[in-house]
Amino acid sequence: MYAPEPPSRPISPWTSPGVGLGLGGLLGAWGLLFPGAFLGALGLLPFLRLPLVLGMALVVLRGLLFPIPEPSYGSRLEGSFRVQGGLTTWEGHRLWVRHFPPLENGIYHLRGYLAPPEAKRNPGGFDQRTWLLAQGVRGVFHVERAKPLAPLPDARTPFRARLAQGLSPLAKEVMEGLTLGEKGGLEETYVWFQKAGLAHLLALSGLHVGFLVGSLVLLLTPLGRWRYLLALLALPFYLWLAGPTPSLVRASLMAGLSLLGLFLGLGAAGVLQALGLALFLQLLWLPQSLLSLSLQLSHLAVLGIALALPPLRPPPTFRGYLVGTLLASLGAQALLAPLLLHRFGFLPLLSPLSNLLALPLVALLVPLGVLKLLLGGLLAPLVEPLAQALILLARWAGQGPLLWWGEVSPRGFALYYLGLLPIFLALYRLLSWRQALLLTSLPILLSLLSAWPKPLDLWALDVGQGDALLARMGGAEVLVDGGRPEQGEKVVRALRALGVGALEVLVATHPDADHYGGLLRVAEEIPIGLALLSPAFSEDHPLVQSLKAKGVPIRYPGAGSRLRVGRGGLEVLWPPQQQATDDLSGLVLLLEFAGPKALLPADVPREVERKLASPKAEVVKVSHHGSRTATDEDLLERIQPRVALIGVGRNPHGHPHPEVLKRLAQRGITIYRTDQHGAVRVLFGYAW
């Protein structure tokens, strides 16, 4: 007599082979970049075992056996090159082609030189090195001369032309974003999508693939299970048409696994299983793609939705649909929040509501957009009003409140996710809500404590040939100059990245464009308590008019003016009165950081420097970008600085002059140049 075998325990989605491979691949790719990440495998090994080890081993072997080669930097290149998507190849190397304006797809005769990609040069700035490495590129082809030879034929051009037929320019750009992921022409409207929390709609991902595949499966219902195979075959066509971005590849892999399972009668793949397999395959193809922001956002958003919805199980009713949509948006935002704040500096607080309202429109526009690729202007009367409705929604929601934040440190990321973990454990009833709230409060408390003490430091931002200096004085900030007008956005991004929500004082030392220009943008975006301007600024000057329009109080101080700012202070050493030229009337400032001092002499010449009544200062901003006639021996003897900051970029004037560099070096002064070092931070201490 035989007893029946006990039913086998269902495989938990958390310990499924797909999740193990995905986590193993993640640890392997991370370990190739930061070897300490391999230690994370020790805690997961008892649960995931072979899939974890296999995923990690395969990705590590891929990275070690087939690394991205480094080209010979400094090499001169000349010849015929095929440029596509801003990239070309040379001796097996993929290269980013740097040329202004960017070269369209085609064959060119190019002449130039190879250089390494640039790292991030300012807080909140663009990290070209990481962006290119995530695409498998380690070299930049700086093109000095480009001669077009022939265009590249593109079989996708007729499809794109049919998509645009019959649409207004703005609706056309929105449809290109929704259908093909192209958003270059949206400009200001794209900013509204960002501020509304709808920018992800213009970056192709699982939402678009889901609507496309769902529509095909529904339309092909009479074909039975063969509809799944036809929908599966449509995915490569869509990838070819829109381009294989990391988020679209992830979505296509997940959809393809589910469609294949349905066609074979095995059922759809679980979300976590498919997500893990997709991550493993993407990292196996290119481990460095882990650095891609698109890949990070895509996987985290799906993971957040997969974690939030199952334990709550909204009912299959219209009300349940609304609740489920809100929960999905909140789940995605919960995991994305620190990354979005870190990379973009703000988080739209109306995002869950705007997504709830946008999804029905997008559910119609995505399949209609794909059909329009084939049918052209026939569908324009239907697509146009729907696209305009989506634009109006983005503009309305884009005026909603935003949570502004600075760059998030690795410790900040760790504290955030440690605080979020108990909430998810409580959702799955692995902890009581009382325990979860108690555990969550600890990382919150630590993060609040980490906000103190406040830094006392001076930042020399990289704005090319110009000056922009930010002084943080223990809770209050002073911005001195802002570079040229085209540098204003860089300055604003740097301020936001450093957590500067408002400026106590804004200073424009004199009306040269390389000093005041970027302040026009700063005045538009950042609240300002007080503006100090050189007497050389006239009443009708653009900066004066911009500040007045914002209601900012303006003062034209002279020598002897003093302000208490935070835990530090600001003193004006020059000019005694309005002078004849801009440089002679430039504001010379002495900043005091609760003890240590920094002298900022604008662009004043040698004859003014000799008249300055300045005490000793630990830091000096080299006058006039290192001009030969500034920062002479007399000034250095009086102030005896330890650090010299030079705001300089490419220029025809020979700045900084060798004589100036020699004078500084002979005195043992440490020299920092923004053209060589990027943004420079001088830390004086902290204030409680």
Image: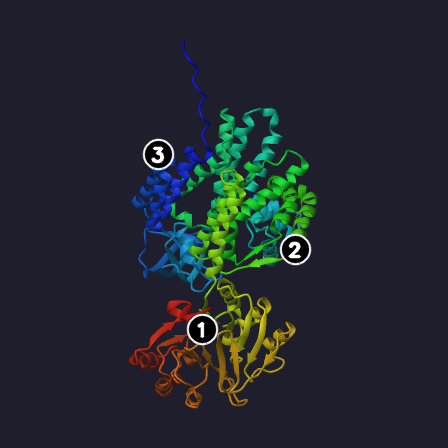
Asked whether residue 573 is in view, the answer is yes
Q: Residue at x 42, y 42 (%)?
A: 282
Q: Would you place residue 447 above or below residue 439 in this image? A: below
Residue contact between numbered discs 3 and 2, judged by CB atoms under 8 Å: no
Q: Would you place residue 338 above or below residue 617 in this image? A: above
Q: Please rate how many residues cluster around mark 2, counting C-alpha atoms within 10 Å: few if below 14, some from 14 to 19, many from 20.
A: some
Q: CA distance from mark 3 to mark 1?
A: 56 Å
Q: Amino acid at mark 2?
A: Arg
Q: Amino acid at mark 3?
A: Leu
Return the residue at label 1. Answer: 465
Nearest to the eye among marks 2 and 1: give it: 2
The colour scheme used here is rainbow
Q: Nearer the viewer, residue 380 or 408?
A: 408
| Image spot of residue 140 (x, y percent) | 39, 58
Query: In the image, is 455 to the left or to the right of 208?
Result: left
Q: CA distance from mark 2 to mark 1?
A: 37 Å
Return the residue at label 3. Answer: 50
- Element carrying mark 2: helix
Query: In the image, is 361 to the left or to the right of 337?
Result: right
The dot on residue 619 is none
- Element carrying mark 3: helix
Return the residue at label 2. Answer: 395
Q: Earlier in the sequence, mark 2 or mark 1?
A: 2
Q: Nearer the viewer, residue 673 or 656?
A: 673
- Element carrying mark 1: loop
Nearest to the eye among marks 3 and 1: give it: 3
Q: Would you place residue 554 above or below residue 266 in this image? A: below
